[in-house]
Image (cartoon, rainbow, N blue to C red):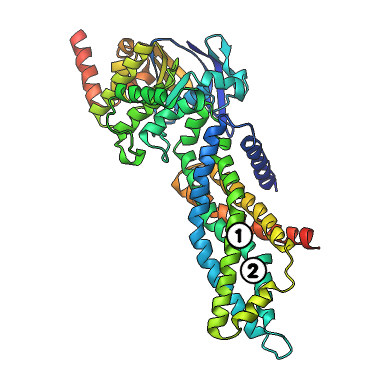
Amino acid sequence: MLVFLRQLGLYFIMLKKVFSKPEKPLIYYQQTMHEMVYLGVNSVGIISIISFFMGAVITLQTAYNTENPIYPTYLIGLGCRDSIILEFSSTISALILAGKVGSNIASEIGTMRVTEQIDALEMMGVNSASYLILPKIIATLLFNPLLTLISIIVAILGGWLAGTTAGVITSEDFIYGIQYAFIPYYITYSIIKTLFFAFIITSVSAFHGYFVEGGSLEVGRASTKAVVYSSVLILLFNVILTQLLLS
Amino acid sequence: MIRVENLNKTFDGRLVLDNISVTFETGKTNLIIGRSGSGKTVLLKSIVGLHEPDNGEIWFEDILFNNLDFEERKKIREQMGMLFQGSALFDFFTVEQNVRFPLDMFTGKTLEEKTERVNFCLKRVDIINSNKLYPSELSGGMKKRVAIARAIALNPKYLFCDEPNSGLDPLTAILIDELIKELTEEYSMTTIVNTHDMNSVVEIGEKVIFIHEGIKCWEGTNKEILHSDNQILNDFVFANSLAKQLKSTENNNSV
């Protein structure tokens, strides 16, 4: 319990340092742009591939589990749309990003710690936590919602392609289904969740990297911990946010 | 001038620095020597503020450094340059960006002015035509020299070097030592070098402090160190067989 409280305290101390006034806003802006490419644009590929197959499977599963003459087939499109927007595109994407981006952040910052690069920054009088972490947080907060939107579009596309190719639904029914009783707030809900998840992934992973002690072995462990803790927190906040935003 | 008074530092209850008091002089290469684990790096990192001492005082001229907060320390830190044991160059920056980094962060110079300064510093440490290389593409000696170029980019008053020639061949180590000494004299800096390399002690040790198990055991010059009667110091200085032979030859001659 004491260890947990100490870690929590360290996490908030780190956040206080991260959100202090930047030394040179222009340099932070350049770093943010760099991180947006590195953490965001470079994740478009993996998110698109996963979303495409996720959408395809959801459509086929929905179709095979609702094979009943009472149900109109356009409900397959509707079910696919709501599952993707409400849950899969934000939560599954976040879990994927926790693995890809989270481990990357933890190992990058952890390596900087054990090779004294962070000491070099501190020595120069640079707020290392802010310089290294703030651009990553801003970049993911700005770019991850875009990744979620891309995920939604590609997943629905995957669902349409799989459904029509497998012959479980016609193109017209699927398109009617994804337009039927559409609630725009669901998109807002998905974006809000994505923002929380982006902050969790970046800050938790950065925390594990920033306070690593030892050598390459510890950096590897920190990277694993970053993914595990981020994933668990994403799932926990998924429940909390769903209750708060949809109740 | 940097003055350390009654400095103590513990880690998890283990005393690493025990009541260290020492003055490091301006325009001189001050060496801290001692065995691995004797507390040299902790002392150096405490002086620059990377470790907080348990008690004691660290004075930069007439400013009590360890009483200052982060923002106040910044002003003094801008006058410091440090060469880390593993060079600590930023992996994601090129050589040029590494040396330019302190200029980007702490000066309002134009890009042309900064590039000019970067090229001057790199030329000063004999790094030519390597501006666009990344640290992973450099040899150990080149990394150290780039790190020195970065350390002197802001024209510092204080230069700190943590084992500057560890992992280098003897010839490159001598070049690095000479470079540190030249820069110290050229810019009249207060330079503190951590080392356990006796070559460095003999070549550049204008003032030498010997630390043993966290205690300052001896203080003097590179001339005096060879004739000291401090047994712990002699065990360290004349540890290798060549040095032992030289010492015994010298003793025989004097008899």
Q: Which residue is drawn at 47% across and 31% down?
A: A120
Horizontal arrangement in the rendering, residue B220 relative to residue A224 (left or right): left
Label of residue A148 in the image: 1
- Residue A79, can we see it? no
Graded by Cα atoms within 10 Å as few (under 14), some (14 to 19) or many (20 or more), the crowding at tag 1 reads: many
Q: Which amino acid does label 1 sit on?
A: Thr
Query: Looking at the image, which is closer to me, A67 or B62?
Result: A67
Which chain does the residue under circle 1 lie in? A
Graded by Cα atoms within 10 Å as few (under 14), some (14 to 19) or many (20 or more), the crowding at tag 2 reads: many
On screen, residue A195 above or below B190: below
The reply to whether callout 2 and callout 1 are in contact (CB within 8 Å) is: no
- Image location of residue B217, percent across then percent down: 44, 17
- Image location of residue A191, percent across then percent down: 67, 57
Query: Looking at the image, which is closer to me, A115 or B155?
Result: B155
Q: How far apart are marks 2 and 1 (CA)?
A: 10 Å
- Residue B60, can we see it? yes
Q: Mark 2 points at which residue?
A: A84
Looking at the rendered structure, the secondary structure element under dot 2 is helix
Looking at the rendered structure, the secondary structure element under dot 1 is helix
**Direction bottom: furthest residue:** A69
